[in-house]
Every structure is written in structure tokens, then in C-alpha cells.
Amino acid sequence: MKLKLSNEMSLKVLGNQLVMGNVLKYLEVFDIQSLRKTCHGIRSCVDYLKPDPQIENYAIHMGTDKSFTAYIEIPGYGNSKAIPYKKTKDCKNIVSRIFADFEMNLKNQKTCLECLELLFDDEIGSEPSELLTGFKKILMNRTQFLKVKKLHLFSVNGEDVMKILPYLDPKSLEVLEITNPYYGNPRVFEPLSVPFDIEEMAKTEQWKFLEELNLKTANISIPIQNMNLTHFSTIYMSLAARITSEDIAYLKENLLTPKLRRFIICFKEFVEDPQLTDLIGQPRAISGNKRIWYFPIPGTNGKMMEILLNERLRFENVNYYRYS
């Protein structure tokens, strides 16, 4: 007799934990979720075994029409699935389904996600904050931190970030990307003009382990020396409200290590008091409003820190004098 799930004997066999354990080794997350829906016995067996779905990337996008799409990628070339959540009269019902799927799909995730991406359109007002509160509850209820290598949030404020960041595994998270588009023009990047506060983020355990920060927003008002940036290897930050000559000297002293790759900080106002030359010496090169300094990096074979200051500030690990 051909084995079918409609067959009572087949259902009993798959309800056996040893048999099911061997079957699950060959199934992907999408197949596992379909299998769970077969019957109570199989669902109980799968839930008891807690198979790791091994999801690599999980993204949720929300459009201007309040439609949602989840994108899930698993190992293997082109092995992904888009799950559209069609708009209905009851928007809360869609959100509940998104939360339920997110929780179920990642419930037994043990391997580290390459990227968790939550992207909201910039025209939908306060809804990202409300939605992120739901994701926060799911992450808080997990028995262990969700392991994520990169967190990408789009169209959020500082408080929104704090609904996700503290509930991810600190030692797994390496990259934090926060992007806020210009209101009403999502295709052309311009930072939002609302203040963005990273002070609370900078106090978290997750922040201390980050290696890379990509922050595209506006009016970052917290002083540079209070941002706890010196352990990063790579930063792109736009737009700091103010930077001083003392900030540059502070960063120069604390970033002068082999782990430095590239730091770029765009700013609105530069306050040179005292004179920068009094703090870090004369620049090696001057061209227009551009000033360049070089400092040898200890513990390297001739590598140098290049500091370039014009309308933005850049620290970079280089092999030779690129300006003279």
C-alpha cells in the first residue's frame, strides 16, 4: 500500500518521535509548517522535537497601502519564499497573522540569522512604533535570545530601535543599520528632520559587541563622546548635529588600533575651539577646505590612520600616504 498522510497507519508512524526526527532532517521550514497542519499527533511530535528551521534571512516590508510582505530565505541558491499579507477591512487581523507567523517560524531557531529586516514606509505615521511593540513582546517571550548577525530597521526612531535591539543575542549581533528616508520621497534618500537619540542604545550590551554601524537619519544630538563608538571598526553616520575639535582628538586617540577600518561622520556644525592643530598637530596636506593627517597604527606593519576633515569627518586604515 502506498504511504499517504491520509492513511491512518502513516499518521501513526509519523507520530513516532524517532521516525519523525529522521524525516525532519530532510525538510525545510516551509515543509515543516505544512506538516504541522496535518493532524494533532504530528503537530505535537514536531513541536516536541523542536526542529531548527535554519532560516538565514527574515524580512518584513510594509508599504504605503498598509500591505505587508514577509520574505524568508533558507540555505541554498534561490531558496526563498515571499508571503504576501493582503489588505482587508480588518487590518488588525493581518497584523495578528504576521506576528503569529513570525513567532512560529522563528520559535525553534537556534542557528544565527544573517539578517533580520523590518522595513516600514515613511508615510504611515505612528504605525511602525505600534508594530514594533508587537515584535518586542514576541522576542521577550523567547526562552533565549534570537541570534541575528545584522539588524536593519527602516523608518524608525530611537525608541523604536529599543523595542528590538535589547532582545537580540549580544554576541551574535555585528551590524546595525538604521535608515530613515525623507518624508514623502522614499526613493531619494534624505534624512528625516526629526531628532534621533541613540543614548539608550549606546548603553545596551548589544551595542558594546557591535562592529559596524550604518546610521542614516538626522539631528543626532547626543555628543560624540557619549555615543560609545570607539569599539566599532566601521561606521557611517549621517547626520550628527555637532562635532568639535576635542571630539576629533578623542576619536583619534581611541580609534588608533588595528581593528579600525573606516569611520565616516557627517555633521551639521563643526566647532574648532581649541584649534585642531593644537590637539593633533599640523595636517600633512591641505586642499581648499580639506585637511588630512596621518598617524602610524601600533601593532601593524606600517599601516596608518588617515584623518580627512572637510564637510564630513573620516578616519580610515590605509597602507600609504594617499595625500601629500
Image (cartoon, grey):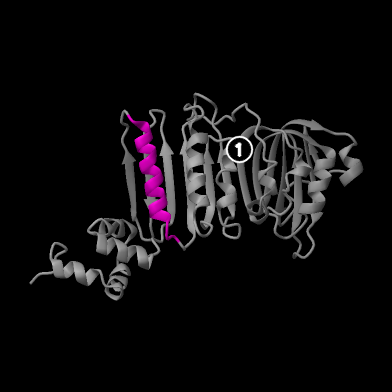
- Is the residue 227 above or below the residue 109 in the image? above
Q: Residue furthest bottom?
A: 18
For the residue pair 260 and 24, the one nearer the viewer reads as 24
Quadrant in which the N terminus is drawn: bottom left
Q: In the rendering, at what x and y percent does residue 227 appear?
A: 73, 44
Q: Say which residue label 1 marks.
A: 159
Q: Main SS of the magenta segment?
A: helix
Residue 284 in view here: no
Is 9 situated left or right of 188 in this image? left
Q: How many marks?
A: 1
Is 76 situated left or right of 190 in this image? left
- Is the residue 77 above or below the residue 166 in the image? below
Residue 196 is covered by the magenta coloring:
no
Residue 57 in view here: yes
Kindly identify the amino acid type of the residue bearing the numbered disc 1: Glu
- Magenta stretch: give its range: 90-109
